Amino acid sequence: MADTLRLVKKISRLAQGKRPLRFMEVCGTHTVAIFRSGIRQILPDNISLVSGPGCPVCVTDDSYIDKAIAYARRKNFIVATFGDMLKVPGSRSSLAQAQADGADIRVIYSPLDSIAIAEKNPRKRIIFLAVGFETTAPTAAATVIAARRSGVKNLFMLSAQKLVPPALKALLNDAAVHVDGFLLPGHVAVVIGAKAFNFLADDFQIPSAIGGFEADEILSALVSLLEQIDGGQVEVVNDYRAVVTDTGNVAAQKVLSQVYAVTDAPWRGMGTIADSGLKMRDEFADFDIERVEPIEIPSVKKKSACRCGDVLRGVISPTDCPLFGGACKPLHAVGPCMVSVEGVCAAWFKYGGNNFRW
Amino acid sequence: MVTKILSAHGAGGQLSTQLLQEVILPAFDNEILHELHDGAKVGRLAMTTDSYVVRPIFFRGGDIGKLSVCGTVNDLAVTGAVPKWLSVGMILEEGFEIAALKKIVASMAAAAREAGVKIVTGDTKVVGRGQADGIFINTAGVGELIGGVDISARNVRAGMKVLLSGTIGDHAAAILAGRHGLELPDEIQSDCAPLNELIAEMLTVEPRIAMLRDATRGGVAAVLNEIARAASVGILIDDEKIPVRPEVRGVCDILGFDALELANEGKIVAIVPSESAEKILSTMRQNVHGTNAAVIGEVVANSAGKVGLRTSIGTVRVVEMPAGELVPRIC
């Protein structure tokens, strides 16, 4: 508490007399942590926190969900997925709906669990929905390597993994996006290293700080951002030194690049971003369901007032979306941001009701 | 519009409530059912029933058998009754190991002994392979209401204290560990236990306890929200006073769960008169199932129907009713 007070005072002092400042927390875990600890309520009025494209489920394109559903509905297929994906609406339906209709969809908590499912169901094809950022992609890669080593032939990946730095670049090149600094994702930085974010200072001269997930760690990172704006040198400040190094987790990077190569990828609301995704290398093509058993999904343009795309770029707040809290709630989500536990809209809905009086 | 049962309908959150309100209650509603407590009060008796579908069947700190006795015993105890008699209905899948069944009934017998209840009637049915998952158990229980005790949301008043009988999330963490091979230290076990003795001791030192709930599916978050709504009061709890084992916190961080929403099988929430809170707390702490008990908050007059949480940095946020499924088939 003493630390908290000191940090809050420092933030107020640094913010005093400044123009309104917008900092973006890139990571969904940060969004939730910020809400859970009630940080917004103690920040000065001229500092606002906007959420970025850091929830893997949220940035996943409709067409991916449609494909996953189509595979799940095929005979002798089992789809293994993180729980978040279940309720995400594709262009017509959701995996949860497919599951209720009889598709075999299993919720798992680690990609490695999918190997056990494959071994127990030798006559079926198991597809793991490999969605996520640099944090989870190495585990998916390790799963593929482990599956090959143990001769598992019926496990496949449907890959839509994404990389954070190219998305930040795209945001900074987007005229609609106004951000004065980035609270950088601590978990991603653990894997890729602090240096991977140097382009923010070198090419864009934008302040950034890598933060942990405790309230005081987030506040410390905000202090670092303000100090850079207050005349300090613009750089990537590592405020999560306990676990983040300059070069990151080299072993994880190696596993990742053994299985995956960089490719262009579609992001919900942001279009296709160059070099922002991962595709399986040819050596592992036999684990890539899209190459083993390609599926054609007619592309559907969904007409919807949902503004997830703008929310994900920090252009609007969830409450600015006409559907928020009315037509779109966690139980009947229209957009993915309302579905995932780390989704921006879900977090606003769940924790944003800042109206407890006593 | 949802036209089919989704697994979230069974998760104790908003969808469960909706199912109850839209499908179940309109069909059966009467003044006794309307109380919607864990058990029903009928004359001088309390009655309850519960079905158990937990997976895996055997987990750290218990199994489906122990759970099926403790869960029903606890539902009776939080109604303000002394649990007396249980029925047991089993649905067995063809091919289920008899050795496993023997183990399960032995642990049911042990739990019944510990709780001081008799299993007095029962039924077994067998379904074909693939038509169930090993074993499902239903138990129903009857108990005798304790004279002078009135556990009801009607009695909850502003100024009362909120007590929690120990660390939360242990059961869910143990189940997850079993299901996903998570590495957890041995002391993380399901908290599955009969709490009737603990509750009887609490009611002896303070018969005016207003509300008791066991915080199963949906966890403490669901139970507090239900109490706040039923009693039309606000409940303000203090994050730093809620006992959570560090390892369980770790599991929550990894899997994106909120410990407040995780299921427990041996934890109660009590709403008690402020003046006797300390006396009840020290009584709880002397019982093996209440050693980590704590006062976690209080009932407030404003914000009726809502639960607030004071965070580590001193701000207050709302604790919502859990929306749906965190961990399927947790009990």
Image: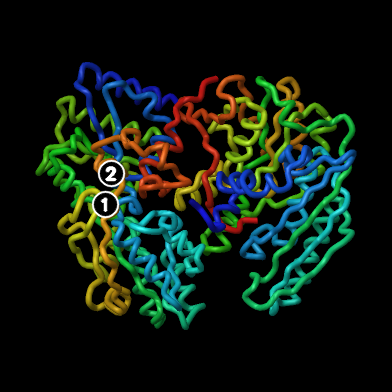
| Residue at which label 1 appears | A268
Q: Chain of mark 1?
A: A
| Residue at which label 2 appears | A312
Q: Position of residue B302 (x, y in %)?
A: 57, 20
Relative placement, left or right, of A142 versus B280 is left
In the image, A306 versus B202, the foreground residue is A306
Q: Dot 1 surroundings within 10 Å: few (below 14), some, or many (20 or more)?
A: many
Colouring rule applied to residues: rainbow
Q: Disc 1 marks which amino acid? A: Arg
Which element is circle 2 on? helix
In the image, B185 versus B48, the foreground residue is B48
Which element is circle 1 on? loop
**Could you tell me if residue A171 is visible in this image?**
yes
Relative placement, left or right, of A58 versus B234 is left
Q: Which mark is residue A151?
A: none
**Could you tell me if residue A238 is visible in this image?**
no
Q: Earlier in the sequence, mark 2 or mark 1?
A: 1
Q: Disc 2 marks which amino acid? A: Leu
Q: Position of residue B303 (x, y in %)?
A: 55, 23
Q: Position of residue A264 (x, y in %)?
A: 18, 61
